[in-house]
Image (spheres, grey):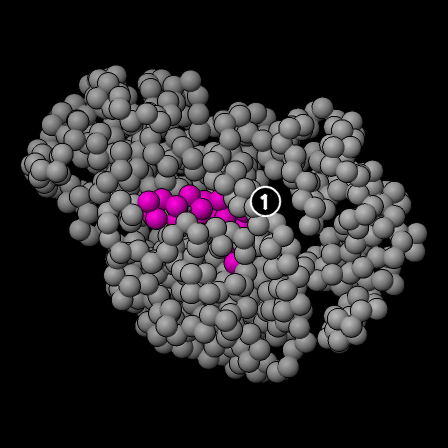
Amino acid sequence: MSLGRVLLDKGKMAIIKSILEDVPPELGYPSVEFEGPYIVIYVSNREALAKYPQLAQHLAKKVHKKIIIRVQKEHRLPPSEAREKIMQIVSREVGLDPIQMYFDDHTGEVWVKAEKPGLLISRGYLVIVLAETGWRLVPVRKIPTESKAVNDVINVLKTHSEYRAEFMRFLGERIHRDVIFKNNYVRITALGGFREVGRSAILVETRESKVLLDFGINVGAADSPGKGYPFIDLLKIDELDGVIVTHAHLDHVGLVPLLYKYGYRGPVYVTRPTRELATVMIQDLIDVMKKSGKYFPYGEKDLATMLVHTITVDYEEVTDVAPDIKLTMYNAGHLLGSAIVHLHIGMGLYNIVYTGDFKFADTRLLNRAHTEFPRVEALIMESTYGATLQESRTQAEEKLIEIVKRTVERKGVVLIPVFAAGRGQEILLVLNSAIEAGLLPKVPIYVEGLVNEVTLIHLHYPEYLNKKIRDAIFSGQNPFGGDHVIVVDRPANRADIVEDRPSIIIATNGMLNGGPILEYFKLVANDPNSALVFVGYQAEGTLGRAIKDGAKEVPIVVENKVETIKVQLEVHSIDGFSGHSDQRELVNYVRAINPKPRRVVLAHGEPNATDALASILRRSRDVRQYVEEVHAPSLLDSLCFIIS
Ligand code: ZN
């Protein structure tokens, strides 16, 4: 036994003992390591593993931790032999790529690309391959067009695999340390995104640990740290146990790389799609800020450092993030991979649910937000639309189809500005299903900008989408595509594209203040047969907002000169495609959540929205029966909950 083992905390010793009791002796002399939130058992006799396919599940149940079984380094086949063996073992139906296999010596994992990665799990190949070769399969979905973001993330992890292995061990020791203080309070502090939208950040502290929920940037004030960033000066970065990010929008994730620039070397917890989407969004933000020549505090290096420290979790999988805090993420219905965060604190005596941004209604893409939790004492909830009602999705779809139909009949161009993530994919689904149902003729749909990269990430993670879309993707279809959907990656031919009439153009950016959509707008603004349709929020001060509010002439920079452009195309605005819950859905969520919270804390809303929702909740007779207090904290406020 090594000195390190002798000095292990009591809690860790107990876990190791409990595990070793149930590991069959014929697996050899196993070693047990704490790697991040996982407990990894390294065995020497790999062949015997085939006899115990349920061992990991059994141990996980016994010690309430995620268990990974790996084979000790000297008992693995050399990669070239292992590759051949894996190809022999795995059925052709799985569509395994023999070229794209990456053997990670530091962990004993082999990353494989497969057309049907689900089969590797459901048919038990993980255990068979481990027993036959000593390598643990990590399946990645292979799709016809590869996503750059998915490959970028894999490459960063490959390059830093040795460091990552070290980091995971260091983190494992930290997470599973013995608790010194018995918990008697939980304190949350509003570091950003309260009584405002943008720069979301919440610090959660107990006597033992500290975690951060989201760390976003207000993109509209990205060059102004005082307004655009959360109160980073209040954080003691080296004391943080972890950062938990609900979803990939920049107002929730945009400044996480800055923590690394300032020396943070702890984990970030996200779902897998959030990791990839955040990479795309952050990379784009860095590029935009670089081009604009404005001050921006971090770069690609810090993004890569973030990725190396990122730990992905699945929905409804319990993960230890500190000795007294367990994290579980649930579907939030807002964006691919978006999560509602449940924190189980101090032996489960205090439970916080943080919704992040959420949609409490089904959309074409996602199921509505999750409502069932093991326990809830406090609910921290967004209030973006706390003062407004939205039209229903059905009304919104009918409106969009009607506008497109009329424009097509006039042989015009329909311009739809979208943000890269979420709306663009949903609009494609609406148009495709209308074409399929014969409600619209099959006209070309041009898609330009980051929307395409984001669509590929959707195709990578069908398991996060609703059943209909998921099943379509599993059966080999691309519900976002079709022979009429044209991906534009060479922007030189935009003038030709607007001559291809009638047609629909979906492009970034969503508020018309830049991006390819602005170039298309310049080309068709003076055409009364064409139409511009807003399907997302238009912020104050943007070109989109000015046009939406009825401006008939707008100044636009063309080749470094300001030109006045006449707005002669039709302008429409549809608000029913929002990824946020409206007032009714927000109130209904408080009614639906089970079990009932005693406190509701409102975040992420302009003051009038937050206050309107607070007063409805305080007045509502049924809500008052269980919610003792509704808080609407200001920036820098702290709330302290005593655990009794
Ligand atoms: Zn969001």
Residue 384 visible, this angle: yes
Residue at x 33% of width, y 41% of height: 419
Residue 149 placed where, x, y %? 47, 40
Q: Could you say which quadrant of the image residue 555 lies in? A: top left
Query: Circle 1: is it few (<14), some (14-19), or many (20+) Cα within 10 Å?
Result: some
Residue 409 counted in the magenta span: no
Residue 22 placed where, x, y %? 87, 59
**Main SS of the magenta segment?**
helix
500 or 92: which is nearer to us?
92
SS category of the residue bearing label 1: helix
Q: Is mark 1 within 8 Å of ligand 1?
A: no
Q: Quadrant of the C terminus?
A: bottom right
283 or 212: which is nearer to us?
283
38 or 155: which is nearer to us?
155
Residue 274 counted in the magenta span: yes
Q: Amino acid at mark 1?
A: Lys
Residue at x 80% of width, y 43% of height: 76
Residue 252 visible, this angle: no
Residue 331 placed where, x, y %? 52, 50
262 or 63: which is nearer to us?
262
Q: Which residues are magenta?
A: 268-287
Residue 558 placed where, x, y %? 13, 34
Q: Could you say which quadrant of the image residue 113 lies in? A: top right
Looking at the picture, does residue 425 appear above or below residue 386?
A: above
- In the rendered structure, the answer to whether residue 414 lies left or right of residue 135 reads left
The residue under label 1 is 158
Hey, which residue is sitting farthest right in the picture?
26
Residue at x 88% of width, y 48% of height: 45
Q: Quadrant of the N terminus?
A: bottom right
